[in-house]
Image: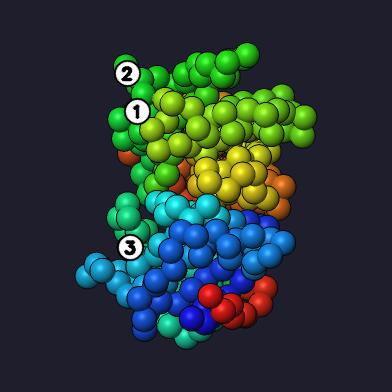
Amino acid sequence: MVLYFTKMHGLGNDFIVVDATAAPFALNQQQIQRLAQRQTGVGFDQLLVVEPSDHEHAEFRYRIFNADGGEVEHCGNGARCFARFVRDRGMTDSDDIAVSTSNGLITLRVQPDGQTTVSMGVPTFEPAQVPFVAERRAHSYRLDLGKCEREVGVVAIGNPHAVSWVDDVQTCDIAATGPMIETHPRFPNRVNAGYAQILNRSSIRLRVFERGVGETLACGTGACAAVVVGIAQGKLDNEVEVDVELPGGNLRVNWAGEGEQVHMTGPSETVFEGKAEL
């Protein structure tokens, strides 16, 4: 079996994109894991799949698999790459591309400067919908990590996130506590762990330990989660776009407040075309 793919990245969060509009996507978890290996495979954080639409109001179906082979609900950096992929290959000429995901419809808007704005959906703070084990909704929760505790804001934006506020993202303990938060028993489906530093009321720095991947250079849903939690807790303004500085570059996020869509804008790049024999 020969797999044809396109290698892409959004601020260093890297992907391979597979066109499965003509033939069904058929890779299993072990094959995805082998491809994701950076020393012996292609190397990527996530594998993105373009499929025929399964919804009357969508042009395509969008699926995401992490490097560990597990399928996940959403990926903001991947969504921007998805939009560039289908536009560059002539699969659509739409500026506003509606795609269906496991969590419903999202819209990808290609801007005149080539960047893409993604409507990421309406965030939810309800513990059962994240999912997160808690008796009631709160602005923040204390997680017992054994030798220490960490206070987190919890939100779902297509996938689950736990956001911690730190004094300095460069010196925070992401390598030690990231895996502990990801697999904490209060998150039945695991969680993405974000570490955010406030620069001012419209600017933050962020590092993210992604579920099933590890720390990445950028995380689109993680950037949205940090901004949403910051606004909900009164730490950030909701009247302007918030600039999110990630190791791989910057994203812009805006959220008007409870019940409203989150919008994220950023770049995407094609690296190379390739094929792999499986």
User: What secondary structure is found at the residue carrying circle 3?
Assistant: strand
Place of residue 63 in the rendered image (x, y in percent of width and height, measured from the top left): 40, 62
User: What secondary structure is found at the residue carrying circle 2?
Assistant: loop
Of label 2 and label 1, which has the lower sequence position?
Answer: 1
Badge 1 crowding class, 10 Å Cα cut-off, few under 14, some 14 to 19, many 20 or more, is: some
Nearer to us in this view, 29 or 213: 29
Amino acid identity at mark 2: Arg
Q: CA distance from mark 2 to mark 1?
A: 7 Å
Q: Residue 111, can we see it?
A: no
Of label 3 and label 1, which has the lower sequence position?
Answer: 3
Nearer to us in this view, 227 or 254: 227
Nearer to us in this view, 261 or 247: 247
Name the residue located 33 percent from the left edge and 39 percent from the top edge: 259
Q: Are marks 2 and 1 in contact (CB under 8 Å)?
A: yes
Residue matched to label 2: 136
Decide if residue 215 is on the left or right side of residue 226: right
Place of residue 202 in the rendered image (x, y in percent of width and height, measured from the top left): 62, 37
Q: Are marks 2 and 3 in contact (CB under 8 Å)?
A: no
Name the residue located 39 percent from the left edge and 65 percent from the top edge: 62
Name the disc covering residue 127, or none: 1
Amino acid identity at mark 1: Pro
Name the disc covering residue 100, or none: 3
Amino acid identity at mark 3: Ser
